[in-house]
Amino acid sequence: MIRSIKRSDYRITYLVLLLGVTAYALLQSLVTPVLPTIQHDLHTSQGTATWVLTAYLLSASIFTPILGRVGDMVGKERMLVVTLLALAAGSVLAGLAHSIGVLILARAIQGIGGAVLPLSFGIVRDEFPAIKVATGVGVVAAMAAVGGGAGIVLAGPIVNSLNYHWLFWIPLIITLIAAVCAHLFVPESPVRTPGRISWLAAVLLSGWLVALLVAVSEAPRWGWGSSKVIGLIALAVVVGVAWVVVELRAREPLIDMHMMRVPAVWTNNLVAFLFGIGMYSVIAFLPQFLQTPKSTGYGFGASIIQSGLYLLPLTVTMFAFGMLSGRIAARYGSKAAVIVGSFFSLGAYLMLAFAHSESWEIYVASTLLGVGLGLAFSAMSNLIVQAVPPAQTGVASGMNANIRTIGGAVGAAVMSSIVTSTLLHSGYPAARGYTYGFAFLAAMTLVAIVASIFIPTSTSTAARDDHEHHLQNAELALVAGGTIAEE
């Protein structure tokens, strides 16, 4: 009986989804400002310590589309619980880790939690009233982005008051609560796509992602012209082509390449990739810029806590405008929200590149970036959900989130190469290194503006399909409720 009652109350489902997404989002960035502390405590090198981030991105890149597809097949609620439990298991292992190898393994397990996003988007579309879907998806997407900024803000106080192990224990508590609530209160999916997992496609997808992300992650250390990097990139291209061929020929593809050719899908994925470059690069390098000693001539000499406070406006405005994105999209269209968000982000990166000598300039740039990311991420998620049939919501939104992660890995690696190419005798980068790096992010955002112009504005077909889907969903819910009540 509890499932039939709770299906009609989508607000409880909403709270549970936000709780799970928050736990995953926090773990994206909590460790970034304290990597030097982890490096020191675990007696490892800087290159090895960066794998604490790389392993997380690699795992999320692989499991996000796969588990999004599995959720479409066997049930989104079931896979949401499995994903949250995997995230919790990784947090336990990370909290207990006293060696860098165990911590890297734990972060890889945590990366499975990336599937929380596509599963949540699919559940929102299944369970929410049609008029609430755009706002629901927008807030979930905004929460995922907000967690990245919130993690940086919270990392300093947690480490100073406790220790870095609590960067994993606190999200663990949230994750376990979300998993239990998901099992009890989130109804099982009425929309399923029967079929099988193409394991060959899954292996090939994993192969080219691993090769690409290892190459771009290690390029700053190995050198972009090294045989290792060139070889891995070439391998990624070959395996990637093989993956596309297998998917095109498969009767039940893991990723529907015909769907990926839909204009509203591929344009949004391109914009997501470019936005990922900027967001992850800022999260990784703006705290380093702020923590650089004043003796260099440009640094602020900020502590971990102080550098987090500089990014507090980003977190607040990202959430606020993510909440407003649905209303803005309803009035002006999601495409307009993406374009406006891109312009705000462009302004932020230009300020960071050319006007970063005063504290107020950093605060303004942080605010502009929060507005831009909040608007754009939420609107892009809505456009993806509207562009595909209900049965493909999980895999389409999962791939969009995944492409953003890939963009982040590529962007952070390129940013690292730009910044560290100007090292001073003191061991810190020259000011021009950060100027060039943030200017690179501005250039990528300018390309995103151009790409967003090509996003289709017509969603009449998607809206009609969505209306028919919700009518079918209501009928299925009535049938399911009557069956459960009889039992």
Image (tube, helix red, strand yellow):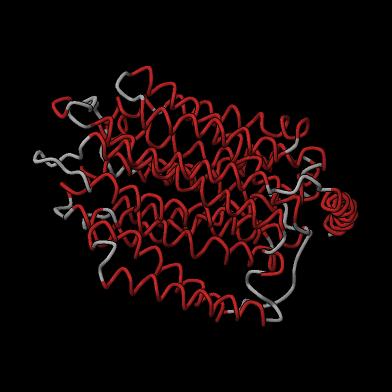
The x and y percentages for residue 434 are 30, 37
Residue 68 image-quadrant placement: bottom right
Q: Is residue 437 above or below residue 296?
A: below
Q: Nearer the viewer, residue 285 or 467?
A: 285
| Residue at 25%, 38% in the rendered image | 163
Q: Is residue 342 above or below residue 403?
A: above
Q: Nearer the viewer, residue 319 or 456?
A: 456
Q: Nearer the viewer, residue 423 or 299?
A: 423
| Residue at 17%, 52% in the rendered image | 42
Q: Quadrant of the C terminus?
A: bottom right
| Residue at 54%, 60% in the rendered image | 64
The x and y percentages for residue 258 are 71, 69
Q: Is residue 100 left or right of residue 283?
A: left
The x and y percentages for residue 23 are 48, 44
| Residue at 76%, 50% in the rendered image | 386
Q: Nearer the viewer, residue 155 or 211?
A: 211
